[in-house]
Image: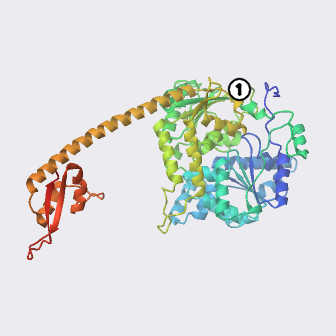
Amino acid sequence: MSRRNTKQSDNRLFVDGERLFKKVMFLEDKGFKNILVTAPLESGKTSFVYDYLLGAGKKVAILSNRSLLKDQNKKYVKRTQAQKNKNESNNREIIDNTLIYCYQIIGNILFETDKDKRRKFKNNFKKRTGLSQQLVDEYFRRTEEFVEKDIKEVDYLILDEAHYFTSDSEFNDNTEKEFEYLFSHCNGVKVFMTATPEAFIEAVRAYEEKNKIEHFERMKEVDLLKQLTPGIQDLIDNCDSEYMTIPEENDNIIQHVNNHLIFNYIHEKDKDKFISEQVKLSNPYNKMIYFANNKRYALIVKGMADGKSLLDKKYKGGAFLCSLYDTDGFSRFIDHEERERIVDNEKFNKDVLVTTKVLDNGINIRDRQVKRVIIDYVNYDSVVQMIGRIRTKNRTDKEKLEITLIVPELGDIKNKIRDSQRAINGEEAKKNNSGEDSEPNLFRIEQCRYTKKAYEELLKFDSLDGENIFNYHFGHIYTLLTHSDNTVLLPPVRGLDKVEEEFKREEDRIESEKRIQAVLREQENEEERKLLAQRIQSCFAKYGNRELLKDEFDMLAKDLNFKNKDGSISKTANKINDHLAEHGYRVESRISREKNTRDKKTYRIVKRC
């Protein structure tokens, strides 16, 4: 296997933007309207947009799944315009021909029919952005115009971070509707781009099958862009044979990941101690990012960092980021200065950045002082996207980035697997505006399959060499990072042995608890059986071996107090006998011989021999 020197910096990972541009043009000429581009994180797959597509005299719309990414994309468009202008400072062709929006605001305009909710959303938008009412009204007017008119007229619609349609479907019911609207109303070429395409591809295929979409209307996947040297790539391009021998193995992405990333797993029970230690290690030259799945806990971690800065001014403290439109009230804690710094400079000033998933897609952080990333998520798309936020391409091999994944407790993992399966089975049907069961969101179903797989693979361990522990969850993450299933070159992963041991201890505790609960239930059942037997004997002494009229039989039923499935008291002979059978008693009934009695039947409780 050929290996190159990476001691200085790694500049071999960019996708050839011109080659990709030509590939997209070729597919467009063939008649394809929906094209999926997948390539590893930090491979430069969007370079063909900014370096080749913009400025080609075409009208382009770029959709993003996070407002931070949208803002950064706007900056890139302005930079592209500036680079093209050089001395022509007044030229605005690229800016004027490029539209940039978030998926979510389009979904809100399209599908939020409740006027009060729309007004609340608009007011919240005004409050978070600080814009005047006039500018807010103009923004929404332009967005509505884009949705209703421009979307049909753009030449290219770039759907950046296209896995949004599946990943956000767990909390956004509109993702399939948004996809369907864009899919059917955009007359131009739609280019879907993502580094984590698995669930998205399955969802699109299910959507195509459901809607009988065929031929050129189906989404076309661009062949995986191998990161080979130009000479080797030319050999492949000019080869007539279906198969060929490649003289140099494509290991540069694998090398990059192995040389620049250090992986570590810890168990949930060790989280508090670990994060506290990591905050203490943080300083302006050893920064840390924590992706938190709980906003309250995130603010506690930020507080830890701020406490350090109060004691010693050489520390910069912490910053907190979440969605500008957070509905739980946490947006008031956003550090807007740091947010703008990330958008403008791709860096942050504080020692510790604590963020929710708002930072997990597309945003670039190019800061060599960021040395550690802690991820409190399990889903593959979230984990891989979070790792990819910190750009390591120009780092030397000595400038490592340490990635720590926090693993939930075993009980929480099993609950997540169970809940995902319930959603897949359609056990969480939601009501539409008419009060009827709404159709399941295909994109959510595929995301739940993907989520279930991630949690299941957390529990799967193996040994590749009889010594080092292999975990299938990490193996999947590594495959997405490198676009390679080469397990031979897997880097060592710290902490897997401890996580596996803790899982075994948890499993033992769970089984022990099950056994204890089984014994307790048996004891309770035995006690209930004894009390029931005593109650039956008491009723037999009171009512046994004599004929009972209907009123007395009703009193017997009340004293026995046997319950039906709906919680009501059993009042018929057949129902009562179902309970009495195992205790050796039964109720007999017969037609009354008395012609003048109001009771058509008489009853008798007897003890069977």
Q: Furthest-front residue in view? A: 609
Residue at the spot 51% in from the left edge and 36% down from the top edge:
408
Q: Is residue 413 left or right of residue 582?
A: right
Q: Is residue 68 above or below residue 587?
A: above
Callout 1 secondary element: loop
Q: Is residue 129 visible?
A: no
Question: Callout 1, which amino acid?
Answer: Glu
Residue 384: image quadrant is top right
Residue 204, position as x, y percentages in the image: 67, 56
Task: Name the spot of residue 288 as percent of width and height, x first.
Answer: 61, 31
In the rendered image, residue 179, in percent from the top left (x then y), is placed at: 65, 59
- 126 and 251: which is toward the camera: 251
Identify the residue at image location x=57%, y=53%.
445
Give whichever of 31, 572 is nearer the camera: 572
The quadrant in which residue 461 appears is: top right
The answer to whether 377 is drawn above or below residue 78 in the figure is above
Horizontally, is 376 left or right of 345 in the view?
left
Picture quadrant of residue 493:
top right
242 to 158, vertically: above or below: above
Q: Position of residue 577 (x, y in %)?
A: 22, 57
Identify the residue position indicated by label 1 in the image.
Answer: 399
Residue 439 falls left or right of residue 492: left
Quarter of the image that includes the N terminus: top right
Specify whether residue 301 is in view. Answer: yes
Are there few (<14), some (14-19), or many (20+) residues within 10 Å of tag 1? some
Q: How is the image coloured?
A: rainbow
User: How many marks are shown on the rendered structure?
Assistant: 1
